Image (cartoon, coloured by chain):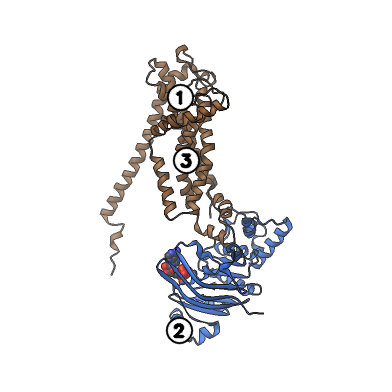
Chain colours: A blue, B brown
Amino acid sequence: MNKHILEIDRLNVSIGADKIIKDISMAFFRKKVTAIMGPSGCGKTTLVRCINRMHELIPNTVVTGSITLYRKNIYEMNPIMVRREIGMVFQRPNPFPTMSIYDNVIAGYLLNGIKLTRSEKDTLVESSLAKAGLWNEVKDALHRRGAFLSGGQQQRLCIARALAMKPRVLLLDEPTSALDPKSTAHIEDLISELKETVTIIMVTHNIGQASRVSDFTAFLYLGELVEYGTTEKLFTVPDDKRTEEYLSRKFG
Amino acid sequence: MRKTSQYNPEDRNIRLYEAIFKLVLKGAGVIMVTLLVALLVTILWQSWPSIREYGIHFYTGRKWDPVFKEYSALPFILGTLATTLLSLVIAVPIAISLAIFSGFYVNSGFLASAIRTLVDLLAGIPSVIYGFWGLFILVPVIRKLELSIGIVPYGVGILTSSIILAIMIIPYAASIGRDVITMVPNDLKEAGLALGATPFEVVHRVVLPYAKSGLLSGVLLSFGRAIGETMAVTMVIGNANFIPGSIFDPANTLSSVIANEFAEATDPLYISNLVHLGLILFVTTTIIGFLGRAVIRRWSVNR
Ligand SMILES: Nc1ncnc2c1ncn2[C@@H]1O[C@H](COP(=O)(O)OP(=O)(O)OP(=O)(O)O)[C@@H](O)[C@H]1O
Ligand SMILES: [Mg+2]
């Protein structure tokens, strides 16, 4: 069994005339947490969006190279299938404000017109909310709209929504940058638990967060992959000077 | 050092500007309210003889016949309802499709700006032009249709007016709808797509539920506009002062009968009756305006 689930091979991305991602090749390990770090504007979001083909929504984006999920090129798959296998959680919590909490969790099924029986839905809602650590807080308000939830709860609802699709990979783009420290801690614990079942790729600006939850870390600079390795190695003895500078500046 | 004193609220000049600015805003508000009240008072005043003379019979009679001094608004109320509702039935689905298309599917690029320009252009054409087009093109077509199904070939009438009205309100409703749909937060659309939904499903399950209140109030605004639209309707409705029996019959709306008869009305009571029709129009459009606001308040989504 291959220990890599997702492989990026010579990926280049340009938006209009700007080269955003420059020849990145890297492989992600199954059921591990990989953190992607780097200064603002270096292309982290762009890279992550290429992994579930959300970059296709941005006009004038040209991508070359390949990304394979279990050796299947995702650019030759149906984008809808890709997005079901590779879930995404955004920076700003974005539960659907017109749906109840219950419907938000199974939104992926509702949106795709996949029919579920009542009991299938109930189990899915309960297990997904439990995995996202939200079940106890909302179990008595499942049929209310999610607008009254706190930011951290909303973000966990979004994680539950993504988990309900049973994805193999979960992309998190700065999932805690809009949250308070307590909710952040909660979500970090959650990420450590979730890697039992899914592979997690997480963009973060928070060096402490990367060191706490990730197994591997990639450092991006101006669209290039500068360094990629175990978090321990990268944080203690980085090979590249730029990595060292970035880390020390943030620590200092 | 950056100078921060430029924004110092203690500065006398700034305080003065603020005060003047507020005064101007308040003044504009007061003028608007005064105008509205003055309008209402004038119309009430002018229609008072009619209200006193006919009372409730003005709404229950079946005929409007100035020669025999028989006056009832009912044929026009029904004519107005029939034409506007029918025009909405035609216009709303088309307008909403256009709005979804240009607000969601292609919101940039050549096609999007072409549609946008076209819609805005259509919205700016004077209604008398639509009236001409109706007379020269639509009326003969409807006449043929009527001949082919074996009914009296008036050509003019409720159906013809509804189609013209629909064409006139489509651009209006579509541009409101487009604005409402573009206002749906991008991150919600992305959330839907990231779950593997197709664009159609995102429109159906995310965009439309979110935009519901805005779209509905857009429909109400279009309704208000259609009710008041005068010129084009007057030209193609056939100006018949009786209760229409079918959508092929000629009729009159509240506004078209006023436009049509005001110039020849000499008897003061006749004039008062026409103003009374205007009062009905005024009250209805005001109520629809308030309803539109209520819908926005009641149904808008909070995040
Ligand atoms: N829709 C877009 N159109 C044009 N350029 C874009 C677009 N989105 C991103 N870019 C450009 O791509 C580059 C990388 O952006 P990206 O959002 O991937 O950075 P990031 O590393 O996620 O930054 P941050 O840490 O601030 O989120 C930036 O220079 C940005 O200007
Ligand atoms: Mg980013």
> For mark 1, does the 10 Å Cα neighbourhood hold few (<14), some (14 to 19), or many (20 or more) residues?
many
Residue receiving disc 3: B170
Check the residue under mark 3 and report the chain it is in: B
Please check whether the numbered discs 2 and 1 fall on a single chain: no
Question: Whereabouts is ligand 1, in terms of quadrant?
Answer: bottom left
Which of the two residues, A72 or A178, is positioned nearer the viewer here?
A72
Residue receiving disc 1: B277
Q: Is the residue at mark 2 in contact range of ligand 1, meaning its CB lies under 8 Å from it?
A: no
Q: Which of marks 3 and 1 is in front?
A: 3
Q: Describe the element under mark 3 as helix, strand or loop.
A: helix
**Figure check: B201 above or below B2:** above
Residue B261, given in percent of the width and then of the height, sits at 41, 21
Mark 3 or 1, nearer chain start: 3
> For mark 3, does the 10 Å Cα neighbourhood hold few (<14), some (14 to 19), or many (20 or more) residues?
many
Residue B110, given in percent of the width and then of the height, sits at 42, 54
Residue A5, given in percent of the width and then of the height, sits at 61, 75
Q: Describe the element under mark 1 as helix, strand or loop.
A: helix
Residue type at mark 2: give it: Glu
Residue B187, given in percent of the width and then of the height, sits at 51, 59
